[in-house]
Image (cartoon, helix red, strand yellow):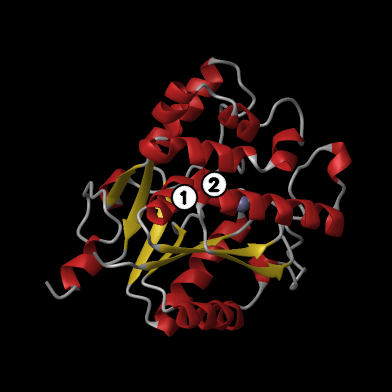
Amino acid sequence: MSRYTLVAFHAHPDDEALLTGGLLARAARDGHRVVLVTATDGELGLAGRDDGTGDRLAGTRSAELEAAAWVLGCARVARLGHPDSGLRPDPDDRTCFAHLDVEPVARQLADLLRAEAADVLTIYDGNGGYGHPDHVQVHRVGLRAAELAGTPVVLEATVPDRLFAWALRALAVLRHPLGGSAPLGTTRVFAAPRTITHRVRVGAVAERKRAAMAAHGSQRRGGDGRRMLDRAATLPMPLFRLVFGREWYVEHGRPAPSRLDDVFATLRAGDPA
Ligand SMILES: [Zn+2]
């Protein structure tokens, strides 16, 4: 059976666990090479009082990223180290990741894709999921990098938008602070179900996904009240499997909607028998 190299490009430490943790753990378990790349060290993320800020928080989050990557079975972690933009960057700040020119950053990622002979690159959907500017930039940079490097398969990690809306409504009914609106109050989040090509079952590696989430301690402590990541990482396993046992992807060039489970299907179809 062919072994492929999958590169997962993410905005901040902890995104890899939440959005793609199951896929990464499953691919690694099946013997594929999994490489994790982060655009920023997440130094503007909400963290606990004792986690520090700026460089100190970046250091903490990088260590958490390494721990999560180890749990997921990643062979390599590469940190591009661009400045975290935060949810609402200053429009005049040209140095934060979200506002960088796409081309030079895409060339940086393309070099890595070529060096790894990457078969698959994961990025985010065009809305950047719930709209964080760094996530939108991951979409733009990743698309261009794959084009430059000739990476054959590009997968956008996403969630069916209706399911996301339903989950927000459920949280609102439960009077949970996350309910009612997306973090940026946008109505355009994630992807329409008719565009989704893959619904990947990750229940078999759910314990690894949960452990990877749990590794991001600083993101479980910050802000008001208990954070979503902390609630997720402490769900009992059967409930965790129910909520986090599937991941959704949009593969470029694949007919949709579809419910493929194998993200390497396109590559396998092209392999000599
Ligand atoms: Zn993020």
Residue in view at x 47 percent, y 77 percent: 116
Q: Amino acid at mark 1?
A: Thr
> Visible in this render: residue 247?
yes
Q: Is residue 260 left or right of residue 39?
A: left
Q: Position of residue 147 (x, y in %)?
A: 40, 80
Q: CA distance from mark 2 to mark 1?
A: 6 Å
Q: Is residue 265 left or right of residue 62?
A: left
- 131 up-or-down from 120: above or below: above
Q: Amino acid at mark 2?
A: Ala
Looking at this view, is 189 or 156 the one in front?
A: 156
Looking at this view, is 186 or 264 the one in front?
A: 264
Residue in view at x 78 percent, y 42 percent: 47
User: Judging from the image, what secondary structure is the residue with disc 1 in?
Assistant: helix
**Res 17 label:** 2
- 57 up-or-down from 97: above or below: above
Category of crowding for the residue at label 2, using alpha-carbon neighbours closer than 10 angstroms: few (below 14), some (14–19), many (at least 20)? many
Q: Are marks 2 and 1 in contact (CB under 8 Å)?
A: yes
User: Judging from the image, what secondary structure is the residue with disc 2 in?
Assistant: helix
**Res 20 label:** 1
Residue in view at x 29 percent, y 52 percent: 195
Looking at this view, is 33 or 17 the one in front?
A: 33
Q: Is residue 86 left or right of residue 78?
A: right
Q: Position of residue 206 (x, y in %)?
A: 44, 36
Q: Is residue 122 left or right of residue 130?
A: left
Q: Position of residue 124 (x, y in %)?
A: 47, 57
